[in-house]
Image: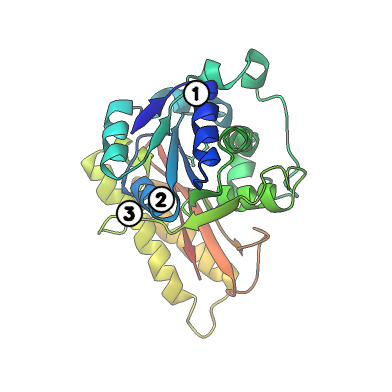
Amino acid sequence: MQILTTKKELQETVRSCKMSGKTIGLVPTMGALHEGHASLVRRCVSENDVCVVSVFVNPTQFNNKEDLAKYPRNIERDAALLESIGAHFVFAPTPEEMYSAEEMNNTFSFDFNGLDKVMEGKMRPGHFNGVVQVVSRLFYLVQPDRAYFGEKDFQQLAIIHFMVERSELAGTFGNLKIIGCPIVREQSGLALSSRNERLSESEKQTALGISRTLFASQEWAKEPEATVAAVQQRVIDTINAIPGLEVEYYEIVDQSSLLPTDTFNHAIGCVTVYCGPVRLIDNIKY
Ligand code: PAF
């Protein structure tokens, strides 16, 4: 496995792979890798001749500077994990290598047809512009055949699908296929997240209340008189009743439009919860 730090090295490397007819898969990450990322990388390795993993804590998608500063970073540990599961190249640039000073201010904005105006987008203005800024740059540099993203960030995945298939950028990335991969959970049910590293053992126990409630809500949705509005409120009330947890939002929305829905068909519930100071997200399909 080779670690590349410049855009030039990356482009030269993928160009020579492509010239020898190899297919390329890309797994964009912000590092602090866990089994969820590993599942994306394993799938990428199994479906492509060459697997490129980017490890870059993208400053332009953080609207909270403290969150950016506290984001866990450990490139040595990440590289060891990636090597052990068969990744071929790691792209780990500095922010200065990735962006000009002007780009660093995230001055451009995409039209996502409203997908960025709800849930995470409403709570973190500009966040998805920053995500698409870095992801589109990575697509441009790597020109992958397939790119892999986790369904834990369901809204991010929907926006990336939109960008590749329907937005003003459609067509720019050739036949790129976006592949969404299922959430990986601990045995306990807790969705794996790099942010879990910031939870103490007791906060981790408390955080289990999130997935426990989401799973219970699948059963509540099957009750004869169940309505979306009532299940949504019951999830919020149940999580908020657990000391140490505070719901920022829970919305049951259509899986494609991300707009509120009044049926459980094709619906997904997306939650953001503060566990102490740590902001956790999770979702459940109905
Ligand atoms: O999901 C993430 O880790 C990030 O948002 C991504 C897609 C790597 C872009 O920085």
> Measured from the top left, where is residue 227 in percent x and y?
58, 75
Tell me if I can see residue 145 in this picture: yes
Residues marked 3 and 2 touching at CB (< 8 Å): no
Q: Earlier in the sequence, mark 2 or mark 1?
A: 1
In the rendered image, which residue does mark 2 sit on?
A: 40
In which quadrant of the rendered view does residue 63 lie? Answer: top right
The residue indicated by pointer 3 is: 190
Judge from the rendering whether residue 282 lies leftward or rightward of residue 126; answer left or right: left
Tell me which corner region of the image, top left, top right, bottom left or bottom right, holds residue 76: top left
Left or right position of 243 against 179: left
How much space separates mark 2 and mark 1, taking CA atoms? 24 Å
The image quadrant where one finds the N terminus is: top left
Three-letter amino acid code of the residue under disc 3: Leu
- Which one is nearer the viewer's eye here, 158 or 87? 87
Disc 1 target residue: 9
Q: Is residue 280 visible?
A: no
> Dot 1: within a 10 Å radius of its alpha carbon, few (fewer than 14), some, or many (20 or more) residues?
few
Q: Residue at x 60, y 63 (%)?
A: 255
Question: Are circles 3 and 1 on residues that touch, CB within 8 Å?
Answer: no
Given the image, on which type of amino acid does mark 1 rest?
Glu
Within-10-Å neighbours for mark 3: few <14, some 14–19, many 20+: many
- Image coordinates of residue 282 in percent, x first then y, are 44, 53
Instruction: Residue at the far bottom: name it.
Output: 224
Element on which disc 3 rests: loop
When the figure is inspected, residue 91 is found, relative to residue 189, above or below; the finding is above
Which residue: 56% across, 22% down? 98
The residues tagged by marks 3 and 1 sit, at their Cα atoms, a distance apart of 38 Å
The answer to whether residue 263 is left or right of residue 111 is left
Callout 2 crowding tier (Cα within 10 Å): few <14, some 14–19, many ≥20: many
Q: Is mark 1 within 8 Å of ligand 1?
A: no
Label 2 residue SS: helix
